[in-house]
Amino acid sequence: MSAPFHDLRSYLAWLEADGGLRRVPCEVDKDEELACLARWAMECTPAAEQYGMLFENVRGHDAPVALHLFATHDRYAAALGVQREGMLARWSCAMREPLAPQVVADAPAYERVSLEPDLSRLPIPVWTPGRDAGPYIPSAVVITKHPQTGVQNCGTYRIQVHDRATLGVFFGSRLQHGARHHALWTKARQPTPVALAIGVAPAIAFAAAAKTAYGIDEMGIAGALMGAAAAVVGGKTVDLLVPATAEIVIEGVIDPTEMRPEGPFGEALGHMYDAAPAPVIRVTAICHRERPIFHGYVQQLPPSDGHIVMEMGVLGPLWHYLTDKLGLTEITDLAIAPGSAGVAALVVQLAPSAASRAASIGRTLAKLNFGQKVVYLVDDDVDVRDAETINWALSARVDPARDIALFDKTATFQPDPAVLRRAATDGRALAGAPYECSLCVVDATVKCDVPEVALPGAARMQAARDRWHETGLPPLRPRPRLSRLLARHSESDLWRRRPS
């Protein structure tokens, strides 16, 4: 297993050495071809074989573009130096014990400084050619600060390139911490200082996507995720601390009064979102390393690594709140169902001791909602990251009339077809996020004695596996699903779930 990485370049070097990075040497157009090639690769590669891509020859640009770097949960975990099973524990520890960033005097991020900014010199792609309004920066760590306390915030927001020196910033919701900072600066009739860090250490990107409490500096969480304080440096034209090892830093100010149409752009559930007025960033400086690497997410229609980063940004803090803050130790694992855009469908694994409390736990999850529409409660024999096993549990263990609880008028953050239909049916114009929707909790746990699962016993299965090399068949690549089922269902112990 790798060690946590303190910049993007060391992670890329490890990823390539591990066989998880493919270089693309042919010339590609960033506005017409790059995202299309990436989408084909992502859609047509088996999950276990997904790889990152480094487009080395972007037409008209010297800088390469790196995509799909956290293509699987194993890659995400490796970026933090843990096994996949240890991701939530690492997040919980980082939330409990953040490490304040360390200010340094000099930094690779400022090897080249331009005070006459020209965004067209950066290889910023169009992610949905023919549909998006133009190039977008989907992976920037957007840094703002509270005008009174000076506490900084790191977030990941939608950034559209308007022209050579201006950007549109779509915060997504007035509740987002960057939006709250901007509102405070605007109330004081002052421009909001902002910095966009692109191509940062994985842990910094992960922390920026996290759903944390207002007033927490995510750079401290990033340091704890890495196991060492994140190095930060003062900006050249803004009074902000930015990641010292970033590939690119764009500095600027958000005008307190100027708004400009932003969009259309494909959102995280895979539908185009119409143009709407959004704040404007006036760029004051573009700084970067020698031959910087532009890092992006192909995040619109799931799946993508951007969705995995979003997913863990929900699950890590949620795990901390549920287990550390609320003491719900009967929850043994959390996952986001594949394809649900990193947030919409939550899978919650419960220990057998939680049998009588499933309904109560479901209500707590509904109240703590981070934007989910569906919450599945499953037993500890279910691999929460395996869609086939989840569907098996839903098919066999759910009585819809008794096991599905509905909660109306809950919040969600994507203007998806369901949200649009509700607004149209109610005769309302769709306002800004959060949007009104509903949520259901599906209790897919076993609630009585059940027959044995139709699998050979663990000892027989292991004996057969020990002889596999004699068969001449391709090497096995076991799924966690089967290992979990065999561990819970053996030939000597009838697995039952008795109501407490």
Image (cartoon, grey):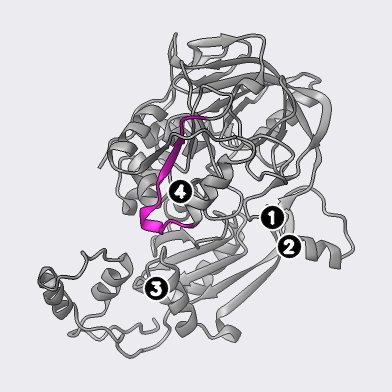
Residue 328, visible in the rendered structure:
no
Q: Kindly identify which residue carries mark 3.
A: 379
The residue nearer to you, when weighing 75 against 18, is: 18
In the image, what residue occupies the spot 44% across and 23% down?
101
What is the three-letter code of the residue carrying label 2?
Answer: Pro
Q: Kindly identify which residue carries mark 4.
A: 316
Which label sits in the foreground, 2 or 4? 2
Earlier-in-chain disc, 4 versus 1: 1
Q: Kindly identify which residue carries mark 1.
A: 271
Which quadrant, please, contains the C terminus? bottom left
Mark seen at residue 461: none
250 on left or right of 166 = left
SS of the residue under disc 1? loop
Give the image quarter of residue 392.
Answer: bottom left
What is the three-letter code of the residue carrying label 3?
Answer: Asp
Q: Extreme front residue here?
A: 26
> Is residue 288 highlighted in magenta?
no
Earlier-in-chain disc, 2 versus 1: 1
Which label sits in the foreground, 1 or 3? 1
Earlier-in-chain disc, 2 versus 4: 4
Look at the numbered discs 3 and 2 and tell me whether their residues touch, using CB distance below 8 Å. Answer: no
Q: Position of residue 71 (x, y in %)?
A: 43, 48
In the image, what residue occupies the spot 54% across and 50% down?
39
Q: Kindly identify which residue carries mark 2.
A: 417
Q: Position of residue 157 (x, y in %)?
A: 63, 37
